[in-house]
Image (cartoon, rainbow, N blue to C red):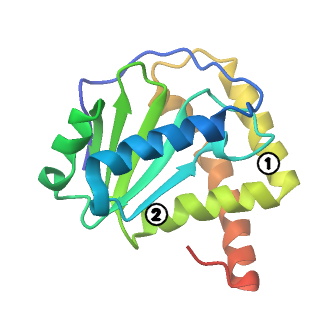
């Protein structure tokens, strides 16, 4: 199941160099999320390209929020809506909310889920491995030159390399005993 609330959106893919302001922006959003949810926010992590120093990124702060059960929207969506987030994506095991100006994407998953693990592993591996960080940046820059019907098409075009990088990250996780 995948539902794009409001349907597909045509958006230009604009990439910028890493900004030292992104961690502070994440911290502000983290406070807003925890303020809205309290103990229901099991984990609030900065993920995505803005969480990897030196990586080219769309200037959108991606955040993973781990809750007890992502499928139980009544437990967290109203509080996050009151804090200024809007529901944008609904899919099995994952919801995505965002700010009205689209500068923050809040990915909600269940604590201990594969979704949570995969995003944190990918982030940690890119923070560690310069070659994969550079390959990912190069692909993103190449893809940003195209005209995409929507942001989902751009994201889908990165999936092959993301899968390759994730395989290397899994090997690294096993060798180093990496855990969430």
Cα separation between marks 2 and 1: 20 Å
Image location of residue 162, percent across then percent down: 64, 52
Closer to the camera in the image, 108 or 23:
23
Closer to the camera in the image, 94 or 19:
19
Q: Which residue is mark 1?
A: 133
The residue at 20%/43% (across/down) is 79
Locate residue 103 relative to residue 168 in the image: left or right: left
SS under mark 2 = helix
Q: Is residue 50 above or below residue 38?
A: above
Q: Is residue 47 above or below residue 170?
A: above
Closer to the camera in the image, 20 or 136:
20
Q: Is residue 82 above or below residue 1?
A: above
Image location of residue 113, percent across then percent down: 39, 70
CA neighbours of label 2 inside 10 A, class few (<14), some (14 to 19), many (20+): many
Image quadrant where residue 43 sits: bottom left
Query: Can residue 156 be spotted in the picture?
Result: no
Q: Kindly give the residue lying farthest to the right in the view shown.
A: 131
SS under mark 1 = helix
First in residue order: circle 2 vs circle 1: 2
Image location of residue 60, percent across then percent down: 55, 30
The residue at 28%/35% (across/down) is 83
- Position of the C terminus, as image quadrant, is bottom right
CA neighbours of label 1 inside 10 A, class few (<14), some (14 to 19), many (20+): many
Image quadrant where residue 138 sits: top right
The residue at 27%/67% (across/down) is 68
The residue at 26%/41% (across/down) is 80
Query: Can residue 48 be spotted in the picture?
Result: yes
Q: Which residue is mark 2?
A: 116
Locate residue 51 relative to residue 168 in the image: left or right: left
């Amino acid at each position: 199941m995948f539902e794009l609330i409001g349907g597909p959106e045509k958006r230009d893919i604009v990439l910028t160099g890493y900004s030292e302001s992104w961690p502070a922006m994440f911290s502000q959003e983290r406070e807003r999320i925890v303020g809205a949810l309290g103990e229901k926010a099991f984990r609030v992590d900065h993920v995505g390209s803005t969480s990897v120093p030196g990586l080219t990124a769309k200037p959108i702060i991606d955040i993973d929020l781990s809750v007890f059960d992502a499928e139980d929207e009544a437990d967290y969506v109203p509080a996050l809506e009151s804090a200024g987030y809007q529901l944008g994506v609904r899919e099995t095991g994952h919801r995505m909310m965002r700010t009205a100006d689209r500068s923050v994407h809040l990915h909600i998953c269940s604590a201990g889920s594969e979704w949570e693990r995969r995003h944190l592993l990918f982030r940690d591996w890119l923070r560690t491995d310069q070659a994969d960080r550079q390959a990912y940046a190069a692909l993103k820059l190449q893809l940003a030159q195209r005209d995409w019907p929507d942001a989902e098409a751009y994201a889908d075009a990165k999936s092959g390399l993301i899968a390759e990088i994730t395989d290397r990250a899994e090997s690294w996780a096993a060798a180093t005993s990496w855990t969430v």
